[in-house]
Amino acid sequence: MNMSEEEVFSIVRHELCEVLRVKPERITPEARLFSDLGSESIDMLDLRFRLEKAFNLKITDAEIVDSLGEGLSNDEIDRKLTVQGVVMFVMQKLEPATV
């Protein structure tokens, strides 16, 4: 699937609006999922399933958090887990595997 970053952002924004029940204008690339948008861990599970369906992907339980780096504290995860981070994660997952 070949999509632009803007297309991926648009879909991620839509799914975040549905999951978190926030207005689209609050979902900016810099917005942190937990402290800015009020996400909880159960919301992340819902988001994961929605992203899998929207982009026809398979995402493992910890894959998004693992993509941020290993051994991070909750504060570090909060700081790094932004809307843009989710977009870049999806973009990376959409890239065809190089053989």
Image (cartoon, rainbow, N blue to C red):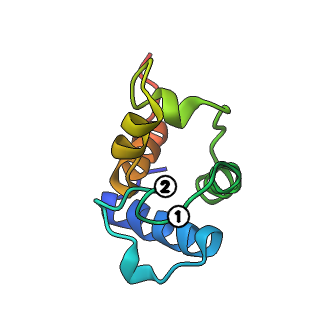
Element type at marker 2?
Answer: loop
Which amino acid, mark 1?
Gly
Query: Going 52% across and 37% down the picture, which residue do you hit?
Result: 64
Residue at 44% x, 28% y: name it: 73
Above or below for 89 versus 39 = above
Secondary structure, mark 1, is loop
Q: Residue at x 62, y 51 (%)?
A: 44
Question: In the rendering, at what x and y percent does residue 18 appear?
Answer: 62, 74
Q: Quadrant of the C terminus?
A: top left
Residue extending farthest left:
30
- Asked if the residues shown at circle 2 and circle 1 are in contact, with their CB atoms under 8 angstroms apart, the answer is yes
Residue 54 located left or right of residue 64: right
- Vertical order, 74 against 84 (above or below): above
- Residue at which label 1 appears: 38
* Spot occupied by residue 61 in the image (x, y as percentages of width and height): 67, 33
In this rendering, the answer to whether 53 lies above or below 77 is below
Q: Residue at x 64, y 68 (%)?
A: 19
Using a 10 Å C-alpha cutoff, classify the residue at mark 2 as few (fewer than 14 neighbours), some (14 to 19) or many (20 or more). Answer: some
**Circle 1 crowding by C-alpha within 10 Å: few under 14, some 14–19, many from 20:** few
Q: Residue flagged by tag 2: what amino acid is it?
A: Phe
**Residue at label 2?**
34
Task: Determine the CA span between mark 2 and mark 1.
Answer: 5 Å
Residue 93 lies left or right of residue 41; in this view the side is left
Which residue is at the front of the view, 58 or 15? 15
Q: Position of residue 47 (x, y in %)?
A: 63, 56
For residue 14, which numbered disc appears in the image?
Answer: none
- Nearer to the camera, 61 or 77: 77
